[in-house]
Amino acid sequence: MKLGFIGQNDLEGLEEDAVFAAANGFQGLEFNWWSSFDEVTEDHVKAMKRILDKNAVEASALGLWGWNHISRDADERKAALTQLERAVNFAQLLEAGIVITGGGDIPGASLEDKVAEFAGVFPPFVEKVEKAGMKMAMYPVHGNSFFVDLECYQKAWEAVPQVGIKFDAANILNHGDDYIQWVRRHGDKVYYVHIKEHLYHGGELASQPAAGMGDVEWGKIMAFLHEHGYDGYLSVEPHGSIWGREPMRRKMLLLSKRWIEQFLA
């Protein structure tokens, strides 16, 4: 397994993160965009790659979040698929191993209908991703993604078996699900892992500190990842108003790395 973290998308911030990653034993940086992705240019992505190469840091993944790829509104779907095509192309430029996106959603529709639309849209993109030597992982439980539980993945795999899980235990826990069963039953379908901590107190999410300081059972997660032979990235996600911002962000990255490394051989 490799360790990385979510990097900044602007070139100045990326330069800082790449230097920090190289100096502290992180092998890769992950990049994510939401609605602003339509403003990203090829020249910008090429400049990002030059910074990564200069510092001998990989692009671990490119994520496209929030776009509704199966919308029943033709214009919305077209716009989303245009951005998905760009995301795949830009991931190739970055030489990222994983493309992460949501499955899209159709509010009020049955799971069967959503899967049918998904199966009608995604295969050409998955094929292009695979031909480029990458994998496509679907993120769950938020941001225009009908993948809200394991049943959604299981139904989708019947139609498009090549897609995998972007596993984020904290998000699944906050959604009220048993995240351990995801890696126990389908660790072989986990293509990418986010390291994000949730600390609950008094029945509410009180903090999102470094890994090991909250309620996520990292040892159990890592046990099942090892059992399934997972060899991908563990990408630390600085999140929240305190630990997701400087000066705590870098402290969170180092503390999380130290905690997770105890489970790596």
Image: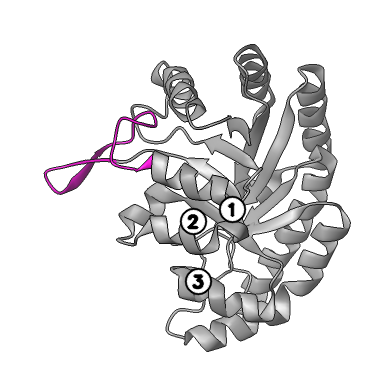
Q: Nearer the viewer, mark 2 or mark 3?
A: 2
Left or right, 245 with respect to 64, comes to: left
For disc 2, the marked residue is 183
Q: Residues within 10 Å of mark 3 (few under 14, many from 20)?
A: many
Query: Badges 2 and 1: C-beta atoms under 8 Å apart?
Result: yes
Residue 199: image location, x then y, percent = 26, 38
For the point 74% across and 52% down, the residue is 87
Distance between the alpha carbons at the discs numbered 2 and 3: 19 Å
Left or right, 240 with respect to 134, comes to: left
Q: Viewer-proximal residue, 178 or 237? A: 178
Label located before the other in sequence (2 or 3): 3
Helix, strand or loop under label 3: loop
Marking on residue 146: 3
Query: Badges 3 and 1: C-beta atoms under 8 Å apart?
Result: no
Label located before the other in sequence (3 or 1): 3
Query: Image height check: is 119 above or below 18?
Result: below
Q: Magenta stretch?
A: 199-218
Residue 127: image location, x then y, percent = 82, 66
Q: Based on the picture, tell me whether residue 251 belongs to the magenta stretch.
A: no
Magenta portion: prevailing SS class: loop
Q: Is residue 162 visible?
A: yes
> Residue pushed farthest right?
131
Marking on residue 228: 1
Residue 154: image location, x then y, percent = 55, 75
